[in-house]
Image (spheres, rainbow, N blue to C red):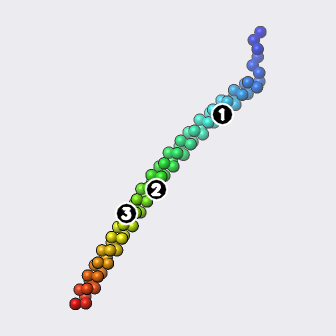
Amino acid sequence: MPRKKSLTTLVQQSVGIRLSSHEKICAERMSNLITSIQRLERKVDTLSDSVSKGKGIVAVLVFLGTIVAAAIGFFNYK
């Protein structure tokens, strides 16, 4: 007569199935989080580059404005 499967082996199998499906879901979530973080890092890099360029442009404009103001002041005194 064949042996009956015990209740504990059935429970262990169902728990194993639940854990493996849970791990798949968690792995998918983690991969989504990683891609999202990488996307955000790229955006931050581009924004910091834009800000640096903006600061450089402002510095050049201030320098040119200083030269123009000095030239106007020089020609007004004569």
The residue at 40%/60% (across/down) is: 50
Q: Quadrant of the C terminus?
A: bottom left
Q: Residues within 10 Å of mark 1 (few under 14, many from 20)?
A: few
Mark 2, residues whose alpha carbon is within 10 Å: few (<14), some, or many (≥20)? few
Dividing the picture into quadrants, the one containing residue 15 is top right
N-terminal label among 3 and 2: 2
Q: Decide: is 8 above or below 37.
A: above
Q: Is residue 25 left or right of residue 57?
A: right
Q: Is residue 21 left or right of residue 6?
A: left
Classify mark 2: helix, strand or loop: helix
- Indicate the secondary structure of the residue bearing disc 3: helix
* Label located before the other in sequence (2 or 1): 1
- In which quadrant of the rendered view does residue 45 lie? bottom left
Q: Position of residue 18 (x, y in %)?
A: 66, 32
Type of amino acid under label 2: Val
Label ID, residue 19: 1
In the visual, does 33 lie left or right of 20?
left
Q: Are marks 3 and 1 in contact (CB under 8 Å)?
A: no
The tag earlier along the polypeptide, 3 or 1, is 1
What residue is shown at x 62% (from left), y 36% (from top)? 23
Amino acid on which the number 1 mark rests in the picture:
Leu
Task: Tell me the element at label 1.
Answer: helix
| Residue type pointed to by label 3 | Lys
Label at residue 44: 2
* Marks 2 and 1 close (CB-CB < 8 Å): no
Distance of label 2 from label 1 (alpha carbons): 37 Å
Q: Which residue is mark 3?
A: 53
